[in-house]
Image (cartoon, rainbow, N blue to C red):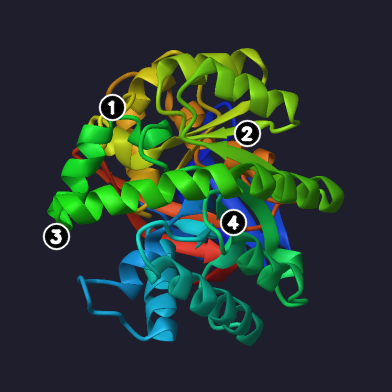
Amino acid sequence: MTRLINARLVLPHAILDGDLTFDDTGIIAPEATTSDPAGDVLDCDGDFIIPGIIDLHTDNLERQVLPRVNARWPSRSAFIAHDAQCAVAGVTTVFDSLSLGDINGRDRIQTFEDGIDDLAELSAAGVLRAEHLLHLRCELIAPEMQELFEMVRDDERLKPILRLVSLMDHSPGVGQYADIARWRKGRLGDGLTEIEIDVSLEEIRANRIEHLEKNRAYVQSFCRENHVALASHDDRLEEEVNRNHADGISIAEFPVSMTAARCAHALNMDVIAGAPNIVRGGSHSGNVNAMDLIRAGLVTALASDYVPSAMLEAAFCCVNQKALPLPDAIRLITDGPARIAGLTDRGRIEAGHRADLVQVHVHDGLPIVRRVWVGGRRVV
């Protein structure tokens, strides 16, 4: 049994200066400071204790697999590094977001194929610090999407950890890449010629016509029959949100416009915003500022997208910029994601919940992770 003393416990709707007792069976009791602490006592020196962070969408593995262009890292080493980066960022539940399809080559396909094997084997071996679950990002215009999906569908190791699926259409002219001129400029920066870009654009458009609707129907049918949470991705227009809602989709992930976010919220859909957008002070691709969505009361949860440490820092940005009080900001990275994913055993400092916990020291407004526990076991 471990007892944390001299802590500031961030509860769902309040901050309690007190002690917290837990073991590997879960949280026993958050309570006001007592004069006679028992068990293995750790003094938190007045730091905050928050629930373990739950990240519904992280592409961080891709950054470890390809730390430089044309420098693919051994996949298992990359996964271990990814896990460590998540843990030291206070992320105790990681939804590894692997892409089914790649409209710009095969890099993401190889990352997916290697990643699902590493995820299954390393999790079974008990060598990972955080708990890893699976989020399938389905590129609907990709010809190979269904074939890749079936690799997970037919793998008994992966079925129990498949908890979230999202529908993506990264075609130029829609969603995140609505500005085709901006998209073309990005491809030029990748080293493509104008002729190569034209050929790629025509191929993408043809694939969109041929594959998008049948892939969408396939994924929707699977999620409905297997009770897996399904999200839309990069919605821009009300028409897109309304169609998703009519199809039973209840999560809007990374809406790229205020219009789409407002529409989703009005339809009681959960809205996930990008934490890096908040830390950077805006979207890296020219879309809606996530802090504006926060201030409008439209966001249910944050996700790291591509920087695990952005989760905690974004929550404190919300506090520092007076957009939210601390308990509300912390709920965006703990209780909110837990509810969306149906994880009823975590996300709160509450008796009976899993002892996924993070000790956070704040220096000049910047949160610094001091200790992390997953299931009552210290991992950082």
Helix, strand or loop under label 1: helix
Give the residue pinned by disc 4: 135
Give the residue at x 47% y 56%: 91
Q: Nearer the viewer, mark 4 or mark 3?
A: 3
Q: Residues within 10 Å of mark 1 (few under 14, many from 20)?
A: some
* Residue indicated by mark 2: 251
Residue 359 shown left or right of residue 3 in the figure: left
- Say whether marks 4 and 1 touch (CB < 8 Å): no
Q: Residue furthest right?
A: 225
Mark 2–mark 3 distance (CA, rounded to whole Å): 36 Å
Q: Earlier in the sequence, mark 4 or mark 3?
A: 4
User: Mark 2, residues whose alpha carbon is within 10 Å: few (<14), some, or many (≥20)?
Assistant: many
For the residue marked with disc 2, what is the amino acid? Ile
Q: Position of residue 237 (x, y in %)?
A: 49, 20
* Residue at which label 1 appears: 320
Verify CB contact (< 8 Å) between mark 2 and mark 4: no
Q: Which secondary structure, mark 3?
A: loop
Picture disc at residue 120? none
Please report whichever mark, 2 or 3, sits nearer to the chain's N-terminal start: 3
Q: Nearer the viewer, residue 113 or 325?
A: 113
Judging by the rendered image, the residue that carries numbered circle 3 is 191
> Which of the 4 image quadrants contains residue 147?
bottom right
Q: Earlier in the sequence, mark 1 or mark 3?
A: 3
> Residues at badges 2 and 1 in contact (C-beta under 8 Å)?
no
